[in-house]
Image: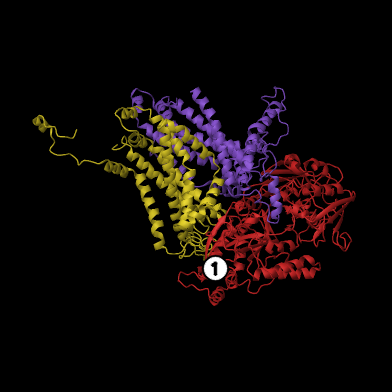
Amino acid sequence: MKIKTLLMGAVAITGLAPAAFAERASDGQVNIIYWQAPSILNPFLTGGTKDIEAASLVLEPLARYDETGALVPWLAAEVPTLANGGFSEDKTQLTWKIQEGIVWSDGTPFTSADVKFTYEYCTDPQGGCAQLAKFENVASVETPDDLTVVVTFDSPVSNPYQPFVGAQSPILQQAQFADCTGANAPSCTDQNFYPIGTGPFTVAEFKPNDVITFEANENFRDPAKPAFATVNFKGGGDATAAGRAVMETGEFDYAWNLQLAPDVIASMEQGGMGTPVAGFGTGVERVMLNWTNPDPALGPDERAVIGPHPFLQEPAVFKAMSMAIDRPLLSEVGYGDAGKPTCSWVAGPEIYAIEVEGCFEQDIAGANALLDEAGFVDSDGDGIREANGVPMSLVFQTSTNAVRQDFQALLKQWWSEIGIETELRNIDASVFFGGDPGSPDTFQKFYADIEMYQNTFDGTDPQSYFGNGLCDKIPSPATQWQGENVSRFCMEEYDALHAQLTQIDDPEERVRISQELNRLAFENGMMIPLVHRGRISAASNTLGGVVLNVWDSELWNVADWYRID
Amino acid sequence: MTEPVPASPKAIEALRDEGPLAPPRSQAADVWAQFRKHKGAMMGAAVLIFITLAVLLGPYIWTLDPQRLDIRNKDLRPIYTALWDGTANVSWGHPFGTDNLGRDQLAQMIAGGRASLAVGWAAMVLSLLIGTGVGVLAGYFRRLDGPLMRITDLFLSLPILPLLLVAVTLFRQPLRAAFGPEGGMFILIVTIVGITSWMPTARIVRGDILALKEREFILAARSIGTTSGKIIRRHLLPNVLSPIMVSATLGLATAIITESALSFLGVGFPSDFPTWGKMLADAVPRMSEFPERVVLPGTAISLTVLSVNYLGDGLRDALDPRLRGR
Amino acid sequence: MLTFIARRLLLSIPTLLFISFAVFMLLQLAPGDPMAQVPLTVPDAVKEKMREALGLGEPPLVQYWKWLVQVFWIEPKVLIDYLTASSTLFSWLPDTALYQGELRVISWQTRSPVMDIVVQRMPQTLWVVGLAYVVGVLIALPIGVYSAYRQYSVFDQAGTFVTMIGFSIPPFFTGPLLIVIFSVGLGWFPSIYDTTHEVTDWDSFVVQLQQMIMPVMVLALQTTAQISRYMRAAMLDNLGADYVRTARAKGLSEAVVVNIHVLRNSMIPVVTVIALGVPAIFGGAIITENVFKVNGIGQLLITALFANDLPMVMTLTFIFAVLIVLFNLIADVLYGVLDPRIRYD
């Protein structure tokens, strides 16, 4: 590597590249492959990560999270805080100052009116905006002048950085989308496929669910960026092929989210064309325990509605199940470098995680002793213990995914060693994570004893995510099986503590309460956390400037990417 | 003809043989004799019997549990790799090696073969029965042709994935309650593969029947008052045997492979229940490091299909009276 | 024959309506949710609003009726406008402006007209899947004929062996195997198909050939295996027939006997199989397209199915059904041509 490129790399990473070193569009084409193909480039009409990340090359928010999870100003001049006076003392008003001189890719100036329009676009009652939750508490968005945006909340908020922050909530151009609000949103194909943005690239050709060609934005605010003239953004296929194309054949420069077994990734790395990059966000793979009785003999209004479960709420049972698990082994087999064993529901950001004694050690003998002590013994000699008169036999469901099926097999084996029988079931992700109330197989309906999946939250503040354990979020037939409290966990103490969290601002106290919530969930058998999952992507060895960011779009700093000669 | 004719016994006496030159041969014996001459068919039969016996009796000889994980012995290579690679990680305890979770591959092959063969045969037979039945009825009875072929068109156009999901939603729980998780799934899989793959057979058989029923021998049969059922059984079915045999062979392969695709959707057997198709599918990402994991199930499927193919060839030749005795 | 065709075409309209209704009800019954791919971070209440915006709240029959109107009334108008305005064939006609901005069939994933995406996918589908089918059939017919003519010769045995193995090894294995050998190992062909590639000169044509060769090989192997088996079996049935002996006895050459007399009489099952396969070209090759990222109609259908994009699935299935009905009709007509004794009226 030449000194110049080394320097460039260092500069690009710190995000300060001066014009003297680089020249816009001088590095040719960069090839990116997402094994899920983007369908649309308007993040407000889709919740899909693939679409949001593809759009992040073009559309930008006022501020976003960097690779450490810290908030950095993007189109705004600075992040408004209590300290700098941008966030009002009563916590109801946030004032953004927009950077001067930013223009859209069509050359028109970017103003606060665009920001206000974005708010109106998303909150239109007929629009079906996917990011509506970001604007939940917003009472109004005002524009005192062209570069100032005042967001007023209807009540004091502890975390005001929801609207216009992060790749999920970028700014749309008012001039382009003015006729696309509400019921008109679906007929605006051109706008949704070719959004005008402030980002480093513009859309040259969009083939939905296939490939996107981007070109460098002539009007991008940094005259030296982006280094690449075009981006070939291919979608489709599977993670194996995407990893192979970057690390073995070198056809592509960047492959997104390689959900592959670590030995498969390691063998691809032998190809020598690229390297995997890993980062840890908020995702935790866990086993949810059903607090209601999923017995098929019960009627539709009782099955998985009426608790308790015949035996899963017995502390001895879920503790023994947790003790029987070799978490470091699971993490190693399933995720390698991209996994850390954990007993925390919220394991990232790390400050909220809890230490649990014995979490990393498997203790089959101890688990057996615990069950024996509690009186759950195998009375009929079939190798399966009985609890309260029923055999301890569990239906264990999850979505179809090679790693999850390996986990299922391992857990089944360990639990069989403590006398708990498991029947495995795997369901296609489009059904499992779907919300069709008619399907018996959705994760929310939970017609099984236990189920395994990963959940995450946006940003770095876990308050609303901890809300997923509240009693009033339990899915039931009355709510069309909607509700985030999938395990149907319900504890007064937990609800009270969460209410306390929403009132408190002191950061240290928030951490303490969050950890306490984490502990309550774990110790009372809401779930059995398994692995804190990282994200693995792969970058070509000739691609410089890649900084994996799990808190925002992975392509957040694509303007800084360059070709290593 | 066979009744004794009492008139002029002397003349007949002169013509009488001392005894039959050869014992009378039944049709079955003729077919068997012809079949035995067919080397390919005999080989096919031998291989098929071997595979069937291996998967049926295998679990009693090789008693390791195919679902048992032995994580310390994961990723073992088959014993034969030691021939050319002295450093290979092999163990006589696992002659075919182990997978990435340490499950014994030989035991998996045996258990997987049971499931795959059972699903393959059952689904193939079901699909052939429906396909041939619909094809014959549509081809022979003009009145039924229209409705039956339009139903065939409908089944050809149905998207399979939603069909599978509907079947699971409606039938998995009742079947599981009645036949247990694996038995219920077996019935569901066989039925689904069967009812989604009979259409080509039906159209092919119908096409052939349409042509055959205009031939002179059918006219002759009809003119002596043969009933439709008899015409179909005696005259038409034997003549459409070859395309049916081809359908059967191809159908067996399709059924074994389709089963593996179903488990991705949660329609198949539980994920820790091995089948050849699933073993093959799971091993694809690691095929350059562990080629045996694709080669073993791949060979097993191919051998089964090849032997059924040769068996079908031999059977067809043996049942063709024009070829018999040549 | 003409009345037969006219009657069948007329009859195909209610058939297709019935098929489309059956498919629609099947999709309604199937579990699945267009919001399944939306991350869990989006709250349920927001997902419910998004569903409403897609029109999911309406009764199924209303949804079906809207779809029917869009497919049979609005989409043809768009097509006619396109034909008279910009196609080379009909642009001499005065420009029509039938389409007045009514709602077309809109995909739930992309919020864009389904037909536009289908048209966009046609080139790669026809290039790869269509070509593979043609290649497969062209190889299969001579193999089938010659294998039957020289039954149990070395050629026949080898052909049987290769085709049966080819058929019993699924494309989800052969595809990656070819990639490992030819892309990773030898570096001859790209493992990912570039749908934006345009053929303008000889060099770009070579690139196109390179990226097509592996998917075409995988697909053609399956087609060849299937059709050559049927061809061989049908030829064997006829080669022993009395008319063949007669033809030989009257001094016809072997070439004429085999290629004209026997072949024509053996074509009925083969024509059936080929006609069944043509709509499947349009249906695309789901697994192969996915392995090589060809992103044709098959990939479109499977992503739509996984995303529960009902308008897209309905429309693709319907086009597929039209082709099935059409090609089965063509097969029926061909039976009559091949064997004049077959009569339908």
Chain identifier, red in the render:
A
Q: Nearer the viewer, residue C15 or C134?
A: C15
Q: Is residue A13 left or right of residue A207?
A: right
Q: Quadrant of the N terminus of chain A?
A: bottom right
Q: Is residue A321 left or right of residue A459?
A: left
Q: Residue C304: where, in percent of width, then height?
A: 63, 44
Above or below, comparing residue C162 to residue A86 in the picture: above
Q: Residue C280: where, in percent of width, then height?
A: 55, 38
Q: Nearer the viewer, residue B94 or C230?
A: C230
Residue picked out by circle 1:
A414
Residue at the image point whose x is 43% and y is 55% from the top: B114
Q: Quadrant of residue A177?
A: top right
Q: Residue C168: where, in percent of width, then height?
A: 48, 46
Above or below, comparing residue B230 to residue A78 in the picture: above
Residue occupying the far left of the picture: B10
Visual colour scheme: by chain
Residue C168 visible in the current orientation: no
Q: Is residue B133 left or right of residue A154?
A: left
Chain bearing tag 1 is A
Chain identifier, purple in the render:
C
User: Tag 1, which secondary structure?
Assistant: helix
Residue at the image point whose x is 63% and y is 66% from the top: A527
Q: Badge 1 local density, few (<14 within 10 Å), some, or many (20+)?
A: many
Q: Is residue B285 left or right of residue A180?
A: left
Chain identifier, yellow in the render:
B
